[in-house]
Image (cartoon, grey):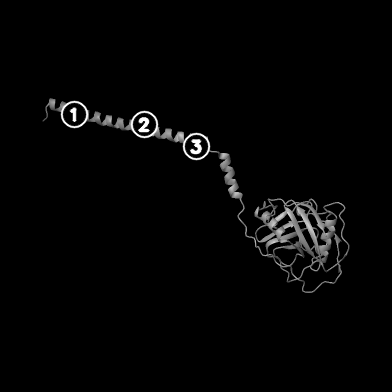
Amino acid sequence: MPTNVQRREQAKRKLERQLVRRAERAKRRRVIAVVATAVVVVVVAGGAYFLATTDFSKSGDDAAASSTTPAPIQIPTEVKALPTRPTPLADPATCEYRPSTEPASKEGTKAPEAGAPASGTATATIKANIGELKLTLDRALAPCAVNSFISLAKQGYYDGSTCHRIGTEGLQMLQCGDPTGTGSGGPGYAFDNETWPELTYGRGYLAMANAGTDETTKKGTNGSQFFIVYGDAQLSPDYSVFGSLDEAGLKLIDEVARAGHDGSFDPSPGGGKPNKEVKFESVTVA
């Protein structure tokens, strides 16, 4: 059996071992605390630097700008020749300009005379803020539409008006002719379509905009609004083609299209107000 001296020596050695282990554990805790403190300091310092040097306003604006930048659109470059009527109209043509349910958007606007030549062409020049748009008006295609356009131009009806709608996908066209700029304005009268079943549309065409057939009168709803086809236009033959726009003018419209729109007419009828304004300063007819 161990003696008392031996037992004391064993207890002493056990105590020494315990003290060594405690010291080592305490040392490890101090090292871990120092490292943790250093990490916290680095993180806090880095965060402070990030907050101090980052322009959140600019980065937010850049992100918003990138999310709203319109995707590049594909525009056909080939100008389509104007169609020819399968059967010529009687010359002169007899046009019926009926009073519409809404008053004229410009006070004092008058409907044109009922008789209209159905042959020959006229030229018109739209002086706009984007440049000059030169039109060729074809009486053989739509004599009543040409007659109305010339009458309104001579009355100054289009002067100061803006093109209120542009489509960049599916139907690539710029719609104009409403002095109110809303798409609901008109000259105070309406007239019928001058179309035929085989009619198609293409780049360079001028065509009348309408609201379909009037449910009460069962007649056409053409007025003052028209559209310029600058690209694709897979439309049913319900819109009277009455002329064309020259190539230089089409290139100006292309730039308006590439600037995009605000989507205010989506989903129906589609498109929106052009981001790049098109405003008519004057419209003259030769």
Mark 1 crowd level (few <14, some 14–19, many ≥20, 10 Å Cα): few
**Which residue position holds label 3?**
50
Q: Nearer the viewer, mark 3 or mark 1?
A: 3
Where, by quadrant of the figure, is residue 100 drawn?
Answer: bottom right
Q: Tell me if mark 2 has few (under 14), some (14-19) or many (20+) residues whose alpha carbon lies within 10 angstroms of its own.
A: few
Residue holding disc 2:
34
**Residue at x-position 13% and y-position 25%:** 5
Q: Nearer the viewer, residue 279 or 264?
A: 279
Say above or below: 94 vs 30. Answer: below
Q: Say whether marks 1 and 2 touch (CB < 8 Å).
A: no
The residue at the point 16 percent across, 29 percent down is 10
The residue pinned by badge 1 equals: 13
Q: How far is the residue under mark 1 from the one under mark 2?
A: 32 Å
- Asked whether residue 39 appears in the rendered view, the answer is yes
Q: Position of residue 45 (x, y in %)?
A: 46, 33
In the image, residue 66 lies at what x, y percent? Answer: 58, 48
> Alpha carbon of mark 3 to alpha carbon of mark 1: how far?
56 Å
Which residue type carries mark 1? Arg
Quadrant (top left, top right, bottom left, bottom right) of the C terminus: bottom right
Q: Secondary structure at mark 2?
A: helix
Mark 3: secondary structure: helix
